Image: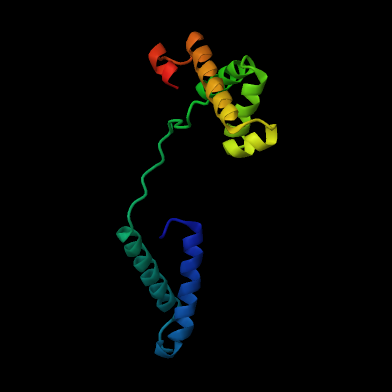
Amino acid sequence: MVGEHHEAEDMAQETFVRVIRSLDHWDPDRPIEPWILTIAGNRCRTLLAKRKRRPQAHPIEEHVADHRPDLQPAQILTEEVHLALQQVRSEYRQAFLLFHEHELSYIEISEQLGKPLGTIKTWVHRARREMIARLTQRGVLEGREDEIRRV
């Protein structure tokens, strides 16, 4: 009647619980089987009525679009930045990496490298400019030369 095995089992259990609770209402002069079947039918109809009131689930689409981001452009950019960074003077590169990757302040970099604060700021700035220029030359960045000079 309910169409699903697990729900049929649930209805059978509920039927017997109701039978035991209502046994004092049963007329012993009448057969018990129709009385139990009536209780079972009522339980199933109640379940079916509840099922109709529930919102219907929509079938899952057969083809689900892949909305994951394409990581290939990011990987290419990472490789290009790494190549550009390798071409920067070693002291500029060192200061740049301490600032951007290790997130040290200019003062901390100055203390670690034993160089004046102004020198560290200049090195990080020059590393940025050289990298932008190299990335622009390789066509990775689209920019005008006047914008690069301002960096």
Please name the residue shown 47% across and 63% down the image: 8
The percent position of residue 21, horizontal first and vertical second, equals 46, 85
Location of residue 25 in the rendering, given as x and y in whole percent from the top left corner: 39, 88
Residue 106 placement: quadrant: top right
Residue 104 seen: no
- 148 and 59: which one is in front? 148
Q: Nearer the viewer, residue 131 or 2?
A: 131
Query: Dividing the image into 4 quarters, which one contains the N terminus?
Result: bottom left
**Front one among 37 and 58:** 58
Name the colour scheme: rainbow
Drawn side of residue 144 relative to residue 133, left or right: left
**Residue at the far top in the pictured view:** 137
Q: Is residue 59 above or below residue 123?
A: below
Q: Is residue 50 visible?
A: yes
Q: Quadrant of residue 75?
A: top right
Q: Residue at x 58, y 24 (%)?
A: 123
Please provide percent x and percent y for residue 14. 47, 73
Height in image: 54 above or below 85? below
Viewer-nearest residue: 33 or 9: 9
Question: Could you tell me which residue is drawn at 63 percent across and 32 percent down?
Answer: 98
**Number of callouts:** 0
Residue at image coords 51%, 19%: 129
Q: Residue 86: x percent and y percent? A: 64, 17
Relative to 108, say whether 121 is above or below: above
65 in relation to 128, above or below: below
Which image quarter is the C terminus in? Answer: top left
